[in-house]
Each structure stands twice: as C-alpha cells, then as structure tokens.
Image (tube, rainbow, N blue to C red):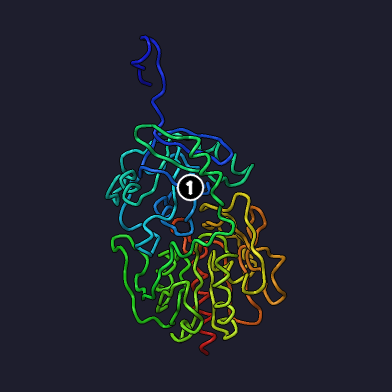
Amino acid sequence: MTQDQDKAPGFWQEPRATALLVLADGLVLEGAGLGAVGEAVGEVCFNTAITGYQEILTDPSYAGQIVTFTFPHIGNVGANEEDIETSNPAASAAARGVIVHAPITNPSNYRSTRHFDAWLKSRGIIGLSGVDTRALTTRIRERGMPNAVIAHSPDGVFDIENLRAKAAQWPGLEGMDLVPSVGSTQRYDWTQTPWRQGEGYGSKEGGKFKVVAIDYGVKSNILRLLTEVGCDVTVAPSTATAEDILALKPDGVFLSNGPGDPAETGKYAVPVIKALLEKKVPTFGICLGHQMLALALGGRTMKMRQGHHGANHPVQDFTTGKVEIVSMNHGFAVDAASLPAHARETHRSLFDGSNCGLELLDRPAFSVQHHPEASPGPRDSHYLFQRFTQMMEKAQA
C-alpha cells in the first residue's frame, strides 16, 4: 500500500485501480491493468487449462469473449512467436480480453522471446490482474456467462456508468455471426506440419488426399495435423460455394472450428454443406464445423449456460468405448435429440452429458465438438485425423 499524500500521516489507501471489469448487471471488479490500453466488450467465460495461454488467446473460436483463467499463474513462461493458433494474420487477436489472478512474473522458459505483457500489447489484448478468478468462475457457473466491458487506463480514470451502459447494451453472442472477422477471405494452400522439439515446424507437400478445409476460423494445429496424416490441404473461405469447392476435386472436406452463433453462420454455410453431402464427399467437422454439420442434417443448436472451455474434459467415444481427456472451447452445443435417424451420436461429455460427436449412417461424414488437435491440451483424440483419412481411402476404393 502507499501513503495518501492528501491525508494526514498515518492514513493509507490501496493504489488506484488501473483496470476494471464491468458486468452488465452492474458488478465492478477492480485490479491492475496489463496488455493493451483501452476498452473492449464481450462475453466473460472461464478456462480451466493450466498451460497454453498463448494458444487459447489466439484461438479464433474465442472471438467476442473475455477469458478468465482459473489457474492463478498465467504468463509465467512468457511468450514466443511460434505458439499462435490463428492462421489469419489480419485477426491478430481472437479473445477480446484476459483476466488473471496473480501479477505476471518475468518469463521463465527457454522458448520465451518476450514478456507476456508485451505480447498482449502487441496483439491488442486488454488484461486485468489481481482479480479473485475463482469467485468470478463460481458466479459464471451459477448465473451463466455475462456480458461485460474490460477496460485498462494507466491513470486509473474510468467512466463507470458509461462502461456499465456499454456492457448492458451489447447484444451478446446469440444471433451473432463472427466468422467474417476471423476467417480467411481468399483461398490458399497449407503445408506446415506440427512442431517438434529441436526442429520447430516442418513442411510437407504432395499428400495422398486432396482436402479442402472450409475456414470458419480454423486453428493452425488442425491444418498441421491434416498435413501430417497425408493430406494436401487447401483452405477455402467460409463464403466459398459448393461449386467452388467441388471444382478443386477434393477427396474430402473439412469443416473448421470458429466463433459465434452457429445458427447465424449456418444461414450461408448449411446450404454448401448440404450440397457436399449430396455428392457424398467424405466430411469431417470440428467444433463449429460439428455444429454446422448437425444443422445441415436438420438438427438444432443451443446456447450453453457456462460453456466448455479447458483442457481437462472427459468425453466418451461410443465407437470404441474409451474415455478421452480432451480440449474444449465452445459456448453452443448440438441438441442430440434433434438429430435425424440417419445420424448417430458418437461422443458425449461426461461432465454434463451434452453431445460431443456424430456420424452419418448413410454417407461418409462425422464430426466432434471437442478439439482433437489440442494446442493446448491432451492428445488423446489425435486418432480422429486417421479416421478421416481412412474414410477418404475407403471412398477412393
């Protein structure tokens, strides 16, 4: 604490807060600012991962959200230029803000190239530290994910009523299509393979299977793993038509992850997916891609109370009987009861019983809600990429 020069000796007060989180219901949380200066409005969620904060904050699926980390020590290994998950250079930041408990320490990792605070500034992400993140997490679990404004002002001067009004007026993620803000706008080829100790990222061309990945906000490690298992990957924008995609003569189509309300994105994505399914092109979807596939089958999606965000979620694969620990990041879910008879549920969350996967019985298509590519998180579900190549191999035969 510091002595207040405007009061008589012996009186003390806490340092002025330089950052705030102002919830739409009026709650104000104070702390120390970090990262970019300014303000941003979004939906507050919590993430239970203890590693991989760079990958989380650059995951395009977090667009429109303010991430609260439940693990108290975030930023302690610094930041680097390799652990980036957005493949679109124009979308330098995915998350709108970050909330952490403990002050950021100096980097302690051989891969670090800069302090986490400097990295946040470079990507325009506003940060707030010194918050009781467990109490905030409990509030989210009990009341759902709130809309809020996160603000950072080094002089500690804020118009709280104005911030509260902005939080209350923000419409929220329901009904919001955020794919145009994070996805690519033109087609490109991808050749990078996963990172390896002592080698970094590799490169591979001329894969056995020609795959078109529809980019709703695709994570880079998904594309790396597709390349790794023998796919020659072309990334197409979300606005690509079925004719555009079929003209590339793909052996398979991948439906990527992404942010926002799937029902809104589905207004233009679903007709394309339906046309591809009619041609019986092998199809694999992840996260938003899973939801898009369900919508194309006539299913429904619904907003979740607290969502799934973390790297410790148990999911059962009914096709093998195994339970996997997976990485998740979604605030909407597929209503399993809405799926048609020719679609079978293949995966289910053991936390809350929500749907986490499906496959079609009459054509080569399947999808999962979780993130088998990890980054961050466990690698229990990497086999799904081989399942996709096996499906394409069978279709070729």
Q: Is residue 197 above or below residue 204?
A: above
- Look at 43% across and 75% down and name the residue there: 236
Helix, strand or loop at mark 1: strand
Residue at the left extreme, as displayed: 113
Residue 314 to residue 395: above or below: above
Residue 287 found in image quarter? bottom right
Where residue 338 appears, as percent x and y from the top left, is 71, 67
Hey, what amino acid is under mark 1? Val
Q: Quadrant of residue 104?
A: top left
Residue lying at the far bottom of the rendered structure: 397
Nearer the observer, 20 or 111 = 20
Instruction: Tell me the quadrant of the picture where the N terminus can be found.
Output: top left
How crowded pointer 1 is (Cα within 10 Å; few <14, some 14-19, many 20+) is rated as many
How many marks are shown on the rendered structure? 1
Q: Is residue 352 left or right of residue 20?
A: right
Is residue 92 depicted above or below 205 in this figure? above
Which residue is pictured at 37% across the width and 9% down the height? Answer: 8
Can you identify the residue that label 1 sits on?
41
The x, y position of residue 234, in whole percent, is 40, 77
Viewer-proximal residue among 193 and 290: 290
The foreground one among 150 and 137 is 150
Image coordinates for residue 363, horizontal then vertical, percent? 62, 82
**How far across and how far down the image is residue 131, in percent?**
47, 35
| Residue occupying the point 60% across, 84% down | 278
